[in-house]
Image (spheres, rainbow, N blue to C red):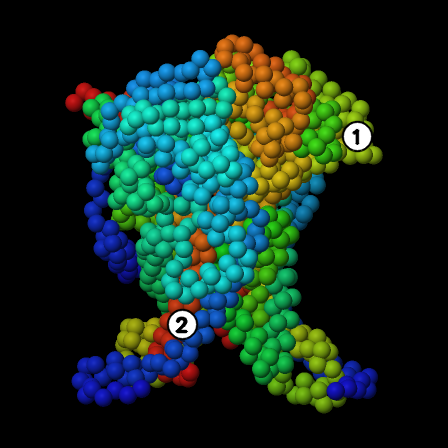
Amino acid sequence: MTILSPPAEKVETLERAAAQGRSLWDDARNRLFSNKAAVVSMIILGLLILIALFGPMVWPHNYKEINAVGPLYPPSLSPFHPLGTDSQGRDVAVRLMIGLQVSLAVGVIATVVSLIIGVAWGATAGYVGGRTDQFMMRFVDVMYAMPFIFFVILLNMVFGRNIFMIFLAIGAVEWLTMARIVRGQTLSIKGKEFIEAARAAGVSPARIVTRHVIPNLLGPVAVYVTLTIPIVILAESFLSFLGLGVNEPLTSLGVLISEGKSNMEARPHLLLAPGFTMALALLCFNFIGDGLRDALDPKDR
Amino acid sequence: MQNNSAPSSSSNALSRLASRFPTGYALRRLLIAIPTMLAVITMAFFMMRAAPGNPYSTDRKLPPEVEANMKASLGLDKPLVQQYAEYVGKVARGDFGPSMRNKDKTVIELIGEGLPVSLTIGAASMGIALFIGSLLGVLAAIRQNSFADYSVMGLAMFGISIPTFVTGPILSLVFGVYLTLFAVGGLDMGRMNFNNMFLPIVTLALPQIAIISRLMRASMIEVLRSNYIRTARAKGLSERSVLLRHAAPAAALPLVSYIGPATAGLLTGSVVIERVFSLPGVGKYFVDGALNRDYTLVLGVIILYAGLIVIFNLLADLLYGVLDPRVKY
Amino acid sequence: MARKTAFMAAALSAVALTLTACGGGGSETDATTLRRSIGASPKSVDPHKAEGTWENDVIGDMFIGLFTEDVEGNPIPGMAESWTTSDDGLVWTFKLRDANWSDGQPVTARDFQFGMRRILDPKSTGSAYGSLLYVLKNAQKVNSGELPVEELGVKIIDDKTLEVTLEYPAPYLPGLLKHYVSFPVPAHVVSELGSGWVKPENIVVNGAYKLDEWRTGDFLRSVKNPGFYDAENVCFNEIVYFPYSDHGAVVRMAQTGKLDMANAFPNERYEELKESLPGWPRVFSMMTTTYVSLNNQQAPFDDKRVRQALSMAIDREYITEKVMGAGQTPVYGLVPKGMRNYPEGAQITWKGLSRADRLVEAKRLLEEAGFGPDNPLKFEYIYRSTGENPKAAPVIQANWLEIADWVQPEIRRVDTQVLYKQLQQGDFEASDAAWVADYNDAFNFLYLFDSRSGPMNYGNYSNPEFDALIDKSHLQLDPVARAKTLRAAEQVLMDDSAMIPMWTPGRQYLVNPDITGFEPNVEDIHRSRYMCRKSLKEG
């Protein structure tokens, strides 16, 4: 089948029509910014991200360096180790920043991986429909019955604790729900008039999906993304807790928690500091996710 | 489905429910479960083999002949595809083979020893989570936007955000070592009791309580706004009766569909709990087995877990259908 | 609020009900039970399939070889009553004592021959540790299938007399014949039941205790064997072994009175435990050396200067005293202190330099070898994910970084199984490695660097001078002259910087001060049959 390229101006109007939903976005933004918990969370999360990114650069200690004070030094301002040192004698505060950095990176990158797979899979299944849809979603059903975290552990074995592989592995198993949500949305959008119109105008299916379907998925996907990041961070820390996490001298919140656990009797702050940081970050993501959902789908409140 | 026995008035409701039981659907679902399980086995089998290392290497180098014999005795000398086919055939007959590292026991024996512990922890914490979680959810919903609502939802947020491997060690330190109220780890010579199971179960239940209370609250709010609750109130039913007899059961429906994912979550969680509290459960076998490349044990545990997830997903769907008359199969 | 409390109470009592229903009352173990934590789950309790020290804890309580150990780990006659040695040291004839298996059958020379043939027969157990018996005549050829098992140098003279022929004189033979690889097994049971003979319902033993119950990952329970030849001196009626690997959990159990002894505790808590569990922590060294294995055949470590520079940079004192701090000692040689007939080991020549001087010299050596800002030294150090190694690795990396910023090591944590595979295949640059002596003799360390040891010589070190000294030692029957030769060999190794000696990992035990019969020893063997509770002795 040959696809004729549609007259340019026609496509233009159609796209403008599709973008008409924008005022909805303004409403949503207003609702989101009037949600105190979400706003506070965004501020805190912003600060955490800044600290994670730039903290290690300005901090007087390097995260690999062994300090003169020796291991398990208690928190002190002079010498400057506000959170003391770890069992090797490295500054805990800077390691906490690095750990936060790695955990956030794992969360974001794995979520992006899951986003790409999930959106591609779900949108294709939903848009193409028929046999293809049935087959693709049956595959998702099959995958749902997998004890995922176990497959992540196995993937980890296969790739030998490579941090990029941890990103990919977690992303590769977290896309299922995303695919379902996207498919559902796609099905409902597919029936809308502007899609019919675009199709009638001869716009190619790939273009319809990328220019019309996917932009309209943004709302639910955004919500799901903010809720996936904390799940991924938890998954990574779970692996680290089992001793399968990132490699030294890098660290992650999970690694720090697991190390802190073994010293918790003598130095409880080594468990509490990363535990609190992780809880704070996850709380922020969850509140923002909740806020986004309420903002985009006001009927719940 | 036919029901020929004359229904007595008391079992009337039950038999009506039973007559709604979709036998055909259940069978179809079980049939679909077969390729699902096959996919699980296949992926796990080849991933395990793709991992570097093998079950028999140690710090000592074996003479090549001995290594060959060891491989042969574990059946690892045959072509991979043949090993796979034989393994699937054996599993179909219920034979999971001997454990490759725990040389004195078979995989079935090992699972038989560990499963009761894992199941007890999982089932008990699920039970508690359902009970407390839905209570808190209902409470928050009927006092929506009150202080009680905010505190329940705030706590729930914390419950979701703090991982079990943080709460576990802290609880065992505080209640086990400092207050000596509960055992800090291990069983009591193979026996489970209140003393040694309380902390693990509570630790595992906490995040589930949080999730369930949030689900329950959202669904309860929706139900309370619905027409039939308004009707019930208008009929002059007591608030208590409206809530308990009408609203709560309807609001609990989404919880049913949560059972499937929750099972998966609990199984994963039990890996951490078993490690934190030194409990001899199946989750521990998996991690140890994976690290030691105990191929048969790892596969056995994965099959078990996947099977449990399939069964609980199916049960949840069936239950949902039985409870909600609107669902058609 | 009151209603909420009531709900809670109801929920809690529901939990209580569930638990009591599946639990049943907890029976306290009594004073005649010894509760030991052995640190890991045994993979097998068959002496011919075992591989680890924690398995030895269980197996050694159940079986007695020709020799056994006293409370300090020294070899003493076990099943052997007396023995004679030929003048050339090659033929040993053992007279067996009158002793029975736990099923009443006598222990005969056949059980020993059966056992040694079983572990070396390539078609039978496929044991990884059979190679320990290669000192027996034809053992290696039997193990590799070149000769039938009947050719093994172990002969039955009569029911109670066993003749063992060796490949070369081995003055350390008694120490080896108390190792589990040489244990007898009940031939009449094993040949009937096959591998199922070790199940609690089938097992037949000749030692002090007999396995009675085994729940994987939970506990093993052995009960006293009344038929043991020294049963009257055995104190505890029952031994329970706990396989918990979480050291923190083990400490908590000891603190709450659920354990009598444990073979590990977290190093960093040594000082604290001395306070909170007075009299419990015991630390001592053992015959193990941790070292960094360097791939001697590949750049950059084919250059002796590079190997020495990396060795000089490591702050062993900081690692052992500050990071570990519970009985570990820094080492500058391969053979640890306290080995039998080996009074003093070789030493690295630069040991006297201060750390600062060592770093300067290390930098000079590397520059001499051609490394510098334009040609950075890059390599990967792999380390095992178990024990103390993950704690030490970041320090080792930081130490190397201190030489100069153009020294750029990467470190990577690897599963133990994979690491050994990589070592044996020579697929590594630098790796952590440790050797636990199988028997108390310096040769057991030095043979690792013999160019003919094949893949056991991880770094592929090869020096004809070293090999010649090893050959020479085989022919020396006089322990003093032999020690001198072995020491010269070790010195060659140190002068070549063939590997980087790191530390002797201490053993960290928690032992209830009320338990008698626990003696620290370099072999780290502590048999339950020597132990007792003070209250039991008095009562």
Front tag of 2 and 1: 1
| Nearer to the camera, B219 or B240 | B219
Residue C163 showing in the rendered view: yes
Find numbered disc 2 in the image and state the secondary structure of the residue it sits on.
Answer: helix
| Nearer to the camera, A297 or C137 | C137
Q: Distance between the Cα atoms at labels 2 and 1?
A: 65 Å
Q: Is residue B210 left or right of residue B63?
A: left
Q: Chain letter of disc 1?
A: C
Residue A177, percent from left and from top: 54, 68
> Dot 1, how many residues are within 10 Å of its Cα: few (below 14), some (14-19), or many (20+)?
some
Find numbered disc 1 in the image and state the secondary structure of the residue it sits on.
Answer: loop
Task: Residue at 37% x, 67% y: name it.
Answer: B138
Question: Mark on residue C371?
Answer: 1
Residue A28 showing in the rendered view: no
Q: Identify whether B53 is placed above or below C101.
A: below
- Residue at the disc numbered 2: B314
